[in-house]
Image (tube, coloured by chain):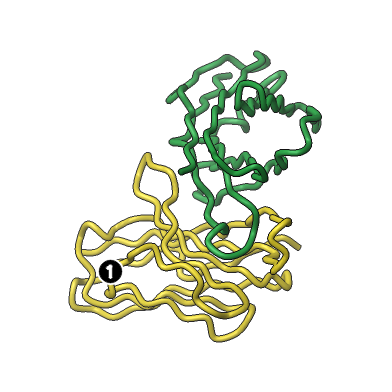
Chain colours: A yellow, B green
Amino acid sequence: DTEVTQTPKHLVMGMTNKKSLKCEQHMGHRAMYWYKQKAKKPPELMFVYSYEKLSINESVPSRFSPECPNSSLLNLHLHALQPEDSALYLCASSQGTRDTRVNTEAFFGQGTRLTVV
Amino acid sequence: AQKVTQAQTEISVVEKEDVTLDCVYETRDTTYYLFWYKQPPSGELVFLIRRNSFDEQNEISGRYSWNFQKSTSSFNFTITASQVVDSAVYFCALSGPSGGSNYKLTFGKGTLLTVNP
């Protein structure tokens, strides 16, 4: 099973709303990621969690707040977003390893299409 | 700094034609990994292949084949006898070894492949 599940699939929110995106994987992966993808662009890395700890924050505005409650779950809390934050938000996971000689592929979910109005 | 260039923005072919998607990369790492992902209109990024920098063997998987050449820093992808279901955006991506700041995937801009019946 190489499935990463994201909910919801679509989300429309106002600029004053608070919402959360959820991501779940049951592959035993220890690295989980949030990417943002604008139309006709490649995905851009936002956050990386490694062994449930935040290891990379790509200078993302604080209106995006990630959370990793356990090794299977990854959340992205949204607050006071702007219309330009409208995009496809992709979650991914990979095996993750402390051995710097090893890299494994990331598996992606179907994404949440977010529209900020 | 890492960089991936996919010079072909869009390719259109007729079903059963062979098509090659080009990927050229730049990195200073001696150990690195190359990937191809497929993104159909549904949005999910589908993992196709991972290749490490020490393995220059070409790979074939059904109608898909990959040609990795370190001498030209290229990792090209060929679809033989294309089918309508192959229509998607294809991303080439690059990462360094896992660990620390190297969980990042650097994506090319993608190639939109349209296979017409």
Front one among B4 and B83: B4
Percent across and percent down for residue A15 are: 19, 72
Residue drawn at (64%, 40%) of the image: B34
Instruction: Tell me the subunit letter for badge 1.
Output: A
Front one among B22 and A12: B22
Residue drawn at (56%, 60%) of the image: A109
Amino acid at the residue labelled 1: Pro
Tell me if A39 is positioned left or right of B108 in this view: left
* The quarter of the displayed image where residue B72 is located: top right
Front one among A36 and B88: A36
Q: What is the number of callouts on the image?
A: 1
Give the class, few, some or many, for how many residues have Cα within 10 Å of label 1's Cα (few <14, many ≥20): few
Tell me if B67 is positioned left or right of B10 in this view: right
- What quarter of the picture does the N terminus of chain A occupy? bottom right
Q: In the displayed orientation, state which residue is furthest to the bottom.
A: A69
Percent across and percent down for residue B21 are: 58, 24
- What quarter of the picture does the C terminus of chain A occupy? bottom left
Q: Circle 1 sits in a helix, a strand or a loop, which is it?
A: loop
Residue drawn at (73%, 64%) of the image: A99
- Looking at the image, is A5 positioned above or below residue B37? below
Percent across and percent down for residue B19 are: 62, 18
Residue drawn at (63%, 57%) of the image: A107
- Looking at the image, is B70 positioned above or below residue B12? below
Which residue corresponds to mark 1? A61
* The quarter of the displayed image where residue A45 is located: bottom left
* The quarter of the displayed image where residue B24 is located: top right
Front one among A17 and A47: A47
Percent across and percent down for residue B65 are: 74, 27
